[in-house]
């Protein structure tokens, strides 16, 4: 069994290269006394879209045993309650260098690229929640799932994010 310890890093444009895009507010497109409007934080074509909600529970286990990918679909993960950690992998998810763990705070998000391995986020707090947005039918028609232990990999979060 190959151990793949991951130390979560802060999600950023640089840290997401090869995995997807970082979604975070920059300078507002419009500002008033009542609100700031940030337009086009991320753009991806979906046609009809599904919006789901993943409710995350901290079990105290920070091992990632399963991953999934969507070869034809991007997926937006937007934490709305509590910060989350995303385990991501490129390519065939077979080498330690293919993996990354990224800490995503509430108010930011990740647009996971097509073909990037992932699963529901983890959290260090008691619980968290994130909206998930992708093309309609992705879960039924564009999902490949793998078992990391069956590939001889033990992928886990080593410690809190840096």
Image (tube, helix red, strand yellow):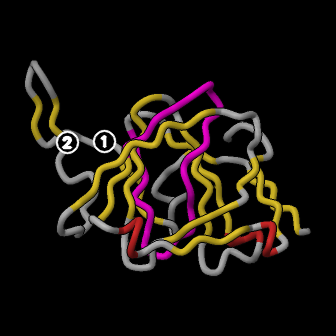
- Residue 8, how many percent across, how many down? 67, 47
Q: Residue furthest right?
A: 1
- Residue 15, how many percent across, how many down? 55, 58
- Give the answer, above or below, for where 138 lies relative to 124: below
Residue hosting label 1: 25
Residue pictured at 71% horizontal, 55% vertical: 64
- Between disc 1 and disc 2, whose residue precedes? 1
What is the count of numbered marks? 2
Rendering quarter of residue 92? bottom right
Mark 1 element type: loop
Local crowd size for mark 2, using a 10 Å CA cut-off: few (<14), some (14–19), many (≥20): some
Residue 23 in the figure: left or right of residue 152: left
The quadrant of the image that shows the N terminus is bottom right
The quadrant of the image that shows the C terminus is top right
Q: CA distance from mark 1 to mark 2?
A: 6 Å
CB atoms of marks 1 and 2 within 8 Å: yes
Report the magenta residues as a range. 108-131
Q: Residue furthest top?
A: 33
């Amino acid at each position: 069994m190959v151990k793949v310890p991951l130390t979560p890093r802060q999600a950023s444009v640089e840290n997401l290269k090869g995995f997807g895009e970082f979604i975070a507010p920059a300078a507002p497109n419009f500002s008033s006394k009542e609100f700031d409007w940030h337009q086009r934080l991320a753009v991806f074509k979906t046609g009809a879209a599904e919006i789901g909600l993943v409710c995350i529970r901290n079990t105290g286990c920070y091992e990632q045993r399963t991953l999934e990918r969507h070869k034809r679909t991007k997926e937006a993960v937007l934490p709305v309650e509590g910060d989350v950690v995303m385990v991501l992998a490129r390519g065939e998810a077979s080498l330690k260098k293919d993996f990354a763990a990224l800490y995503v705070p509430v108010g930011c998000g990740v647009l996971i690229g097509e073909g990037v391995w992932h699963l529901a986020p983890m959290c260090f707090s008691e619980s968290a929640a994130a909206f998930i947005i992708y093309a309609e039918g992705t879960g039924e028609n564009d999902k490949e799932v793998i078992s990391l232990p069956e590939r001889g990999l033990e992928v886990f979060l080593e410690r809190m994010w840096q």
